[in-house]
Amino acid sequence: MTENRKKVLIACDSSRTLLDFRGKLIEELIKKNDVYVFTPKISQQHVREKLRDMNVTVCENALNGSNVSIISDLKYILKLYNLIREIKPDIFFPYTFKPVIYGTMVARLCKIDCITPMLTGLGYNFTDSSSKSKLVSSITKFLLKFSLSANKRIRVIFQNKDDYNKLLECKIIGAKHQAFVVNGSGVDLSHYDYSEPEISHISFLMISRLINSKGVNEFYEAAKIVRNKYPDVKFKLIGSFDDNIDSITTALYAEIQSGDTIEYIGQVDDVRSYIKDASILVLPSYYGEGVPRCILEGMAMGRAIITSNSVGCRETVDASPSGVNGFLVPIKNISVLASRMEYYINNTKDIILYGINGRKFAKKKFDVNLVNSEMLKIMNVG
């Protein structure tokens, strides 16, 4: 008797996330299903080779997930429509905004049986702001409401309860929707091994794209304050400076690149050696995260954290008195951020203790195997 394998189509807005964020899920899916990915061009050869070795069928596109281009987006929609008509997937799993919005529309039109869009954070689209992104945010909300309109074939996945409640509040979803909340993308605890942090030479590490709402400026300004008092303390920043509607200014980028305050490393393919060298992981984001992956990676490797009391970020700090693994700071509050950095400098034993607690918290709540088990059930393949 032949195995009844389902066809699963995954759509994303960046090929870099396929293995980093979804690799373990794809490994589980491929065991009993045929997996296809619809992705922007794969620039990393090891990603292409790994997907090929996993027998994943790849179809590339020219989508730019960070910017608005009507012509580019229309080409994306048409290419996805033709792909779906060709392979006839049983399950469609898009994640991030453009694949969720456009992909869900096309999947509904093509009558795919199970559509499981996942919102990996709401970004700056749902923040109260009068910035240049306001028009884009309004359009995004409208399109999201249209694409996610209640349908028995759609099962919406969130990475935190705040995002779910926000869409309820904005009337983008309602009581009739099938909605599920999972604990972020999870983290592979076997890949991100625990190591005891260095406390004789303190260093703070931030991993993030260089956009304003990730708190890059706040990290930079707090680093200046701390280094004035503790000149031997190191600050490092990993992340790309891309063409994005919310990118930091070229002036700030030039200051960061100068190396006077922060050691700017740029984009890297594997962050583990940098986390191992760091004492504390910092992410002062007010972006509207799902659950920030870099924080989970730091926790898995036993690093104390400082992050914002904001959507997604607050999920990563254990509120129990016996399990403290880091600090939440108010958004955009540079002085509090600097004071929390100073706390670690003067209480080095807590760097180790909070790191141990963070590893335990990651194992309890964010283990990728636990998250993927939930994902497979939602996708009706578990």
Image (cartoon, rainbow, N blue to C red):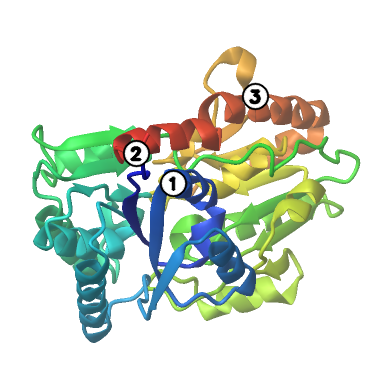
Residue 361, given in percent of the width and then of the height, sits at 59, 26
Please name the residue that numbered disc 1 is placed on.
29
C-alpha span from label 3 to label 2:
29 Å
Say above or below: 39 vs 236.
below
The C terminus - image quarter: top left
Please name the residue that numbered disc 2 is placed on.
381
Q: Residue at x 44, y 58 (%)?
A: 213
Q: First in sequence: mark 3 or mark 2?
A: 3
The residue sitting at the top extreme is: 322
Q: Can residue 304 be spotted in the picture?
A: no
Q: Residue at x 54, y 30 (%)?
A: 317
Please name the residue that numbered disc 3 is placed on.
360
Three-letter residue code for mark 3 = Lys
Three-letter residue code for mark 1 = Leu
SS at mark 1 in the image: helix
Write down the quadrant of residue 109 in the picture.
bottom left
In the displayed structure, does residue 374 sit left or right of residue 334? left
SS at mark 3 in the image: helix
The N terminus - image quarter: top left
Q: Nearer the viewer, mark 3 or mark 2?
A: 2
Residue 244 vs residue 272, the one in the foreground: 272
Q: Residue at x 60, y 73 (%)?
A: 44
Say above or below: 286 vs 71.
above
For mark 1, does the 10 Å Cα neighbourhood hold few (<14), some (14 to 19), or many (20 or more) residues? many
Residue 83 vs residue 365, the one in the foreground: 83
> Looking at the image, how many numbered discs can be counted on the residues?
3
